[in-house]
Amino acid sequence: MARKRYSDEDVLRLLREIELSLAEGLDVESACRKAGVSDATYYNWRKKFGGVSKSQLAEKKALEKENARLKRIVADLELDKLILKETLDYLKPRA
């Protein structure tokens, strides 16, 4: 069976649908079947996205993007530092 990939927004929507089904009195297995996901997937999603709103999700994505950008900057600076250190060692007079 082909594996589906859901976007974070889709996951939040499906979690909300399952929560509404649970509130109507369905059990977890039936609510998950109705939404088209397994109950194991539901529990994993609930652990990862439980209590997260769309605005918090957007903020999380923005922070992850900023963190990746800062990590690239640090990596570039470390590379520059190593190059300068090697150049300095090469240019030092030997006694």
Image: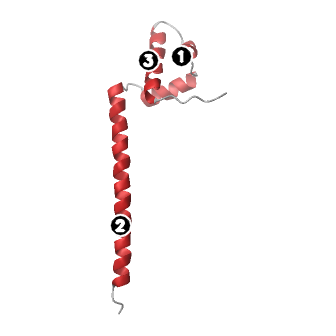
Above or below, 55 against 83 in this view is above
Q: Which residue is mark 3?
A: 16
Give the quadrant of the C terminus. Answer: bottom left
The Cα atoms of the two marked residues, 1 and 3, are separated by 10 Å
Q: Quadrant of the N terminus?
A: top right
**Residue 39 sits in which quadrant?**
top right
The image position of residue 16, as x and y in percent, is: 43, 17
Circle 2 SS class: helix
User: Which element type, helix, strand or loop, lies under badge 3?
Assistant: helix
Q: Above or below — where is 34 with respect to 62?
A: above
Task: Residue type at mark 1: give it.
Answer: Ala
Neighbor class of circle 1 (other Cα within 10 Å; few <14, some 14-19, many 20+) is some
Q: Amino acid at mark 2?
A: Asp
Q: Residue at x 56, y 21 (%)?
A: 37
In 3D space, how far apart are the residues under numbered discs 1 and 2 (Cα atoms)?
52 Å
Q: Crowding near pointer 3: few (<14 within 10 Å), some, many (20+)?
A: few
* Above or below: residue 36 compared with residue 88: above
Residue name at image x 47 percent, y 29 percent: 7
Quadrant of the image occupied by residue 13: top left
Q: Residue at x 43, y 23 (%)?
A: 12
Q: Nearer the viewer, mark 1 or mark 2?
A: 2
> Mark 2 or mark 3, which is nearer the start of the sequence?
3
Q: Earlier in the sequence, mark 1 or mark 3?
A: 3
Which residue lies under the disc numbered 2?
A: 80
Kindly identify which residue carries mark 1. 35
Q: CA distance from mark 3 to mark 2?
A: 48 Å
- Type of amino acid under label 3: Arg
Q: Residue at x 64, y 29 (%)?
A: 2
Display colour scheme: secondary structure
Neighbours of disc 2 within 10 Å: few (<14), some (14-19), many (20+) = few
Q: Mark 2 or mark 1, which is nearer the start of the sequence?
A: 1
| Most foreground residue, 55 or 23 | 55
